Amino acid sequence: MGGYTPQQGQQNHQQRYNRHNNTNRRSQGGASNASTNSNHFNNNNGTYSTTTNIYISGLTPDVTDESFAEMCNSYGKIISSKAIINTETNECKGFGFVMYENEEQARHAMDELNKKGFNVSFAKDSLSARLKNLQDEESTNIYISNIPLSMTDEEFLELFAPHNVVSHTILKDQNGVSRGVGFAR
């Protein structure tokens, strides 16, 4: 297992987190995506956090997915884990995510890893996961680009003739000139 000197790489952990907080997380053992099977709550800044998925920073560059999982395994049953690795250098970027079976195990891991000098917090759902939770299952919005600038609203609607269109629009600038994009529902 790689060395875990929390002081190494901690200075820029927040910068790395902000830059990579939408990173996909791979699951182990066929488990589902980390953002889909845990409890959620709305925190003060309006983003959603999970109570079983945690973010850990302060990892050294030699950490691998395997050594990261091994380090986290002693705090509870792991549903999924992922050390974020730079694909060009094959070195850990200094942070990772781990999802535990329940909130109690996640909190225990947070407490213990924080005591060891790591920066640990509940992970935030990615923007795509939050948007998926908000989507309307009953309707679909379609975004269309590269529409001819001369196309009229009526011609645009004809593109969807065999379908029931509830609403449609071509986006126009302040002068009423088409921007070449539109929406249909």
Image (cartoon, rainbow, N blue to C red):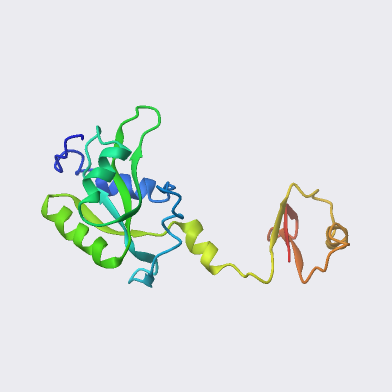
* Quadrant of the image occupied by residue 157: bottom right
Q: Residue furthest top?
A: 89
Q: How many marks?
A: 0
At a point 42% along the width and 46% down the height, the residue shown is 26
At a point 50% along the width and 57% down the height, the residue shown is 128
| Left or right position of 25 against 70 | right
Quadrant containing the C terminus in the rendered view: bottom right
Residue 87 point in image, percent of width and height: 40, 31
Q: Is residue 56 above or below residue 60?
A: below
* Quadrant of the image occupied by residue 64: top left
Residue 152 point in image, percent of width and height: 85, 58
Q: Residue furthest left?
A: 115
Quadrant containing the N terminus in the rendered view: top left
At a point 18% along the width and 49% down the height, the residue shown is 118
| Left or right position of 38 against 102 | right
* Quadrant of the image occupied by residue 153: bottom right
Q: Considering depth in this image, is 84 or 100 the residue closer to the camera?
A: 100
Residue 148 point in image, percent of width and height: 81, 48
| Left or right position of 43 against 184 | left
Q: Considering depth in this image, is 95 or 16 the residue closer to the camera?
A: 95
Residue 137 point in image, percent of width and height: 63, 69
At a point 84% along the width and 60% down the height, the residue shown is 160
